[in-house]
Every structure is written in structure tokens, then in C-alpha cells.
Amino acid sequence: MKLFNYYVLNVVAQGLGRVFTFGSNFIAFALVARFYGADFFGQYAYVLNYFGIFVILADFGLMPVLGKDIAQAKDSP
């Protein structure tokens, strides 16, 4: 039963983290749009999406490989 409680705690923490991230992003976007106007907000959103594509491409396959390497490093002395 202790493992189940640990699992539930982790799921709740992940969920709260995602809600907090979504809320803070929403507030940041609303503030940028309100204070800087529609033109700047459009450029801001374009730049964020442009960098987001490169983050996806840079991370493509990195996490599984990194996880495998870490697991193998723990086995070796």
C-alpha cells in the first residue's frame, strides 16, 4: 500500500505542477498582450513558436538515450 501512496503523491504533484505552469504561462501571455499590444504579441508568439520547434528537434530522442546511458552507468563501476 505504501507504493500506491507514493504513486498517488507523484501523480498529484505532477498535476499541480502542470496546472501552475499553464496558469503562469497564461498570465504571462495576457500581460504581454495587454502591455505591448497586438503587433508585439504576434512577434513574441512567433519567436516562441520558432524556438519551440528547435527545442523539439534538439531534444528528439535525447531523453531515451540519456536514460539508457544513466542506467548503464549505474551498473558499471
Image (spheres, grey):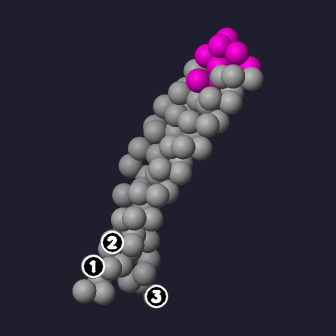
**Residue 17 falls within the magenta-colored stretch:** no
The answer for how far apart the CA atoms under marks 1 and 2 are is: 6 Å
Q: Residue at label 1?
A: 4
Q: Mark 1 near mark 2, Cβ–Cβ under 8 Å?
A: yes
Q: Mark 1: which amino acid?
A: Phe
Q: Position of residue 52 (x, y in %)?
A: 52, 34
Q: Mark 2: which amino acid?
A: Val
Q: Position of residue 29 (x, y in %)?
A: 61, 31
**Horizontal relation, residue 10 to residue 26: left or right:** left
**Residue 44 falls within the magenta-colored stretch:** yes
Q: Is residue 77 visible?
A: yes
Q: Nearer the viewer, mark 1 or mark 3?
A: 1
Residue drawn at point x = 67 percent, y = 11 percent: 39
Q: Where does the magenta region start and end?
A: 36-45
Q: Earlier in the sequence, mark 3 or mark 2?
A: 2
Compared with 9, 21 (above or below) is above
Q: Secondary structure at mark 3?
A: loop
Q: Secondary structure at mark 1?
A: helix
Residue drawn at point x = 53 percent, y = 51 percent: 20
Residue drawn at point x = 36 percent, y = 58 percent: 64
